[in-house]
Amino acid sequence: MDFNDSATEAAFRSAARSWLAEHAPAHEIGAGSKMTDIEEADRGRAWMRELFTGGWSGLTFPKALGGGGLTGSEAVIFSEEEGRYHLPKGPFTSIGTGMALPVIAKHGNDAQRAQFIEATLNGDITWCQLFSEPAAGSDLAALRTKAVRADDGSGDWIINGQKLWSSWAHLTDWGILIVRTDPSLPKHKGLTFFVVDMKSPGIETRPIRQISGASEFNETFLTDVRIPGTNRIGAEGEGWACCMTVLMGERLGSGAHRSGVEPLLDYAAATPDGRGGTMMDDRSIRQQLAEALAEEQGERFFQARLRTMVSKGENPGALAGMVKLAYAARYQKTNGLALELRGLAGIAAEPEDTQTSDVQYDYIYSTVMRIAGGADEVLRNQIAERVLGMPGEVRMDKNVPFEDLK
C-alpha cells in the first residue's frame, strides 16, 4: 500500500489545509482553557456547523444525505490536517459522527437516514451512547435493560433499566440504545437496537464526578420510557450486529486526529536538562521518543489500511480492535513520559503552567482509554480468536438462554 499522496490526494490535502487555516483558529481551545460542560458543548456544535457550511462534514456519506460523497482516504487526510488544531472534537461530537451515523446508515431505513444524518452533521442533533450497565461493561451482551411491546397496539416499546458511563448524556439530544427484547434467547441473540430522544419522559441522567474534576460521564435511568416502533434500528433481534457496527467505528476512530508524539519532541528539544543541554541529549529519552513515534506512525498506517477496507465495503471485524488496543497503550505511555519530562512540575504544576495542567489531565484521562470501546483484555481475546485463529475462550453461557443465567 502506497502511503504517499497521489496527485489528486495532494490537491485535496492542500484545499483542506487552506480551508482549515482560514476557519479553524477561531474555534480552537487554548491550552489550560477551563470551560463548563455547557460551554464545551456549545463550541462543539459551532465547529460542526462550520464544517457543514464549508462542505467538510460527513465526507464519506452520500451527497444526497448531506455528506461529501468522498473516499475513505480523503477522510483520513482531512482528519490528519484537522488534527493540527486543538478543536472541540471530544465525545460530544464524535459519538454522533463516528458511532450513531454509521449504524443508522448501515442498518437504518431511508426515513431514519433522512431524519438523522444531515441534522447530525450540521450540529442540530447531538448523541450519547447508552450501552454499558452496572453488570454489563466489557461483557456488553450481559445487559439487563429490557424492552417490551406496549399492550395498546401502538407498536411502541416500553424500556426499563439503567445505563452507565454515558458520556454527555445530560446535554445531548438523542441516544443510541441497546436493550434486551427476548430473554429466552442466548445473550447475544435477544438484543434490539433503538435510538431514543433524551427528553423522553422517564429518562433521568445523573452526572458522575471524575478524578479530573469533570463530570462528562453519567448514570442514565430509564423508567417506563416509551419509544415509537419507528425508532428501532434494524430488525428485532439484530441488536448485536448493530453494536458491532458502532464499536468498529469507535475503534477505527481511536487516535485519528492528533499526534501525541510530535509536540513531545519539540518540548524535549526546548527543555534544559540542567547540564547545559536539553532533554533530547539524553539517550534514554531519545529512545523512548523514537519508540513512541514509530508506534504512532505504524498505527496511523495500519488505520489507513483498515479505512481503505471500509471504503471498499469490506468489514475489518476484529482487526479494528488492534487500532484501539495499540492507541490506548501508547496514549497512556506517551502522556506518562510527558509528565516525567516535566520533573516535579508533573506532580504539582504552577497555576500559570497551563501546558503541564493539560498533560496532567490527559494522563488521568488515558486510563479511561484502556477500557472505553473495549477493555484491553477483551480486545486481546477477540484478536487472538478471530484474527490469529487461536482456540476460543471457554464460555459457560454459550447457547444458554439469558433468562437461565445466574
Image (spheres, rainbow, N blue to C red):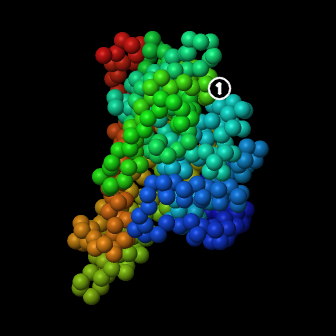
Residue at point 63%, 16% (across, down): 154
Would residue 312 be seen by someone viewing this image from the given angle? no
Residue positioned most to the front: 201
* Quadrant into which the C terminus falls: top left
Give 183 or 4, whichever is nearer the viewer: 183
Residue at point 37%, 79% (across, down): 269
Residue at point 35%, 60% (across, down): 361
Give 41 or 81, whichever is nearer the viewer: 41
Against 376, residue 362 (above or below) is: below
State the image quarter where residue 234 is shown. top right
Q: Which residue is mark 1?
A: 230
Residue positioned most to the bottom: 276
Percent from the top left, x then y, of residue 229? 62, 22
Callout 1 amino acid: Thr
Determine whether, in the image, residue 254 is placed left or right of residue 366.
Answer: right
Give 309 or 175, whichever is nearer the viewer: 175
